[in-house]
């Protein structure tokens, strides 16, 4: 059984940082594409950061330079370090194992709220 569990969300003021974590079981992050997505109220879920099996990272323009995705293959975890947070970063953040164009497996999400 594949499970992804996100943690680390919360309420923060603009300009502060948060670090999200995703623990994966049933699959290994070493050989899978991992991604962080977010969904704001009334908007579609969007891919904001990804890391390939060869550790190539990609970012949405909206978070480039502020967010960093990383993985720990020994612990099968994927992290998202979020710096210089803005109110428009408010969303539910999801971790996914699998390429963006496949169904994959998702976590339950963690809420991030950034106050101005």
Image: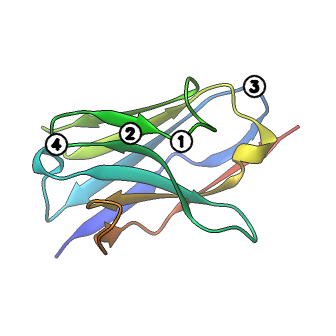
User: In what element is the residue under mark 4?
Assistant: loop
The residue under label 1 is 60
- Could you classify mark 2 by the number of other residues whose Cα lies within 10 Å: few (under 14), some (14-19), or many (20 or more)? many
On the image, which quarter does residue 91 sit in? bottom right
Residue shown at 32% from the left, 63% from the top: 4
**Left or right: 83 with respect to 69?**
right
Does 67 sit above or below residue 9? above
User: In what element is the residue under mark 1?
Assistant: loop
Residue shown at 51% from the left, 63% from the top: 109
Q: Position of residue 101 (x, y in %)?
A: 33, 67
The residue under label 3 is 15
Residue shown at 35% from the left, 61% from the top: 100
In whole angstroms, how far apart are the C-alphas of marks 3 and 2?
Answer: 19 Å
The residue under label 4 is 53
Q: Which is nearer the N-term, disc 2 or disc 1?
A: 1
User: In what element is the residue under mark 2?
Assistant: strand
Q: Determine contact: label 3, label 2, CB under 8 Å.
A: no
In whole angstroms, how far apart are the C-alphas of marks 2 and 1?
Answer: 16 Å
The residue under label 2 is 79
In whole angstroms, how far apart are the C-alphas of marks 2 and 4?
Answer: 15 Å
Does 109 sit above or below residue 90? below
Q: Marks 1 and 3: which is nearer the front? A: 1
Q: Which is nearer the N-term, disc 2 or disc 4?
A: 4
Q: Which is nearer the N-term, disc 1 or disc 3?
A: 3
Q: Determine contact: label 2, label 1, CB under 8 Å.
A: no
Q: Position of residue 60 (x, y in %)?
A: 53, 41
In whole angstroms, how far apart are the C-alphas of marks 1 and 3?
Answer: 19 Å
**Left or right: 86 with respect to 54?**
right
On the image, which quarter does residue 57 sit in? top left
- Could you classify mark 4 by the number of other residues whose Cα lies within 10 Å: few (under 14), some (14-19), or many (20 or more)? few
Q: Position of residue 42 (x, y in %)?
A: 75, 71
């Amino acid at each position: 059984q594949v499970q992804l569990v996100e943690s680390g969300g919360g309420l923060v003021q603009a300009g502060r940082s948060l670090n999200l974590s995703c623990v994966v079981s049933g699959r290994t992050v070493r050989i899978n594409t991992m991604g962080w997505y977010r969904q704001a109220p009334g908007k579609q879920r969007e891919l904001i950061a990804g890391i390939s099996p060869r550790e190539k990272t990609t970012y949405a323009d909206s978070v480039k330079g502020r967010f960093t995705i990383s993985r720990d293959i020994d612990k099968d975890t994927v992290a998202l370090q979020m710096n210089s947070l803005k109110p428009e970063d408010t969303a539910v953040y999801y971790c996914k194992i699998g390429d963006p164009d496949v169904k994959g497996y998702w976590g339950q999400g963690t809420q991030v709220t950034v106050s101005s």
